[in-house]
Image (tube, rainbow, N blue to C red):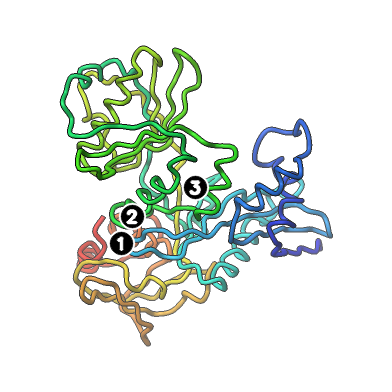
Amino acid sequence: MNKIEIQRVSNAEMVEHKYKLDYALGGSPPLRPPTTEEKERLIAYWGEGINLLLFREGQLVGGAISSTMPQNVRGKLLPMSGIWDVAILPEGRRQGYSRQLALKLCAELHQDGQVVSSLYPFRESFYTRQGYVTFPQSFTVSFSPRPLASLLNFPLLGRVTRHRYSDVFDEVRGYLSQLQQQQFNGFALRSEASERVKLAWYDPWVALAHHDNGALIGLMTYTIDEYKGTLYADRFLYHTSTGKYLLLEWLARHIDQVQQVSLNIPPQGRPEKWWPDLALQWQANVRPMGRIIEVEGLAGIKVGEGTFTAVVDDPLCDWNEKAFSFTSQDGRLQVTEVPRASSSLRIQALSALVYGTHDPADFNVLGWGDPPPELQEQMRRMFSR
């Protein structure tokens, strides 16, 4: 029988092996080996997290990387680990090694105090079996900016200024932190140190939308590929209507420079309602997924009134396999271990409630539990979608 060993390694050790694993993650073979400078940049960019390498009989066949970042989960910033670059080389595939990596990674995350985990899946069904649930769909929308031309004559209460990201890093970071804490369930941010390292290879334009009173009310980070080409915005964020229309007016200023704009839109965005005659072309993005690593770590998130008890079924994280009481107290969730419970839920169901991804009536068909109608209604009151 082949001997399998999974090692937790430092960033410096991981970077020496990563380019072997990149066979499974992109184009290959590489044109050249990474330079020392590129390796050092990656080591710094990864920041704090967990790196795993999987060996079979001493030969590298797989690995995974995770980075620690806080995530807004129903109004509370929880310790979250973003998992990425999970890779199994062809000689190790179809032998259960991805699940072994997932099992080991969850144990390490638990040991490090991570409460939740998120990732972009190579296949949703695989990670659903590991306890993850799929988040709402985000989109990239493309359109000609020409219909926005009439915005140029509208007296908006504010103005937009253009900068390089590196020149306004602190202001951008502050605004993203504000949105994370106040608005977006599931919003995670990499560490400030990691984002500063990223500037070495990605330093886009930033359009900052300020209200007349000086308050920052929207931002867009973007690049332009060529004259008469496309303006690509990976962030198009705002928290007021004026902020949104200031950014759209900024796009209108490019109608003679670019033929198309392409915006990354979060799930709650409704670009079809922004302006008449925008012939939107929609492209679905890869949907992220999330799961609970530590059930008791959910204490303190915002919930509606109610209470219920459930035994949690979580084979990947056996420390969660207990009976719990979930109770709202002053609008915050209290999680308490109890001797027995009136219902049973798989970890996918609890993750779905917390992230607001599924209605409790879906759980039976999905195989995540079978809460009776009265309990479903209780869950809806506590965990509004």
Q: Residue at x 42, y 66 (%)?
A: 346
Of the pair 267 and 98, the residue shown nearer to us: 267
Label 1 secondary element: loop
Label 3 – label 1 distance at C-alpha: 26 Å
Q: Quadrant of residue 141?
A: top left
Mark whose residue sits in front, 3 or 2: 2
For the residue carrying disc 3, how many other residues have a C-alpha within 10 Å: few (<14), some (14-19), or many (20+)?
some
- Image: 377 above or below 140: below
Residue tagged 1: 75
Q: Position of residue 10 (x, y in %)?
A: 70, 61
Q: Position of residue 259 (x, y in %)?
A: 39, 14
First reached walking from the N terminus: tag 3 or tag 1: 1
For the residue carrying disc 1, how many other residues have a C-alpha within 10 Å: few (<14), some (14-19), or many (20+)?
some
- Image: 348 above or below 183: below
In the rendered image, which quarter contains the N terminus?
bottom right
Mark seen at residue 124: 3
Q: Position of residue 74 (x, y in %)?
A: 31, 61
Q: Are marks 2 and 1 in contact (CB under 8 Å)?
A: yes
For the residue carrying disc 2, how many other residues have a C-alpha within 10 Å: few (<14), some (14-19), or many (20+)?
some
Q: Are marks 3 and 2 in contact (CB under 8 Å)?
A: no
Mark seen at residue 185: 2
Q: Amino acid at mark 3?
A: Glu
Label 3 – label 2 distance at C-alpha: 21 Å
Label 2 – label 1 distance at C-alpha: 7 Å
Of the pair 17 and 33, the residue shown nearer to us: 33
- Image: 39 above or below 202: below
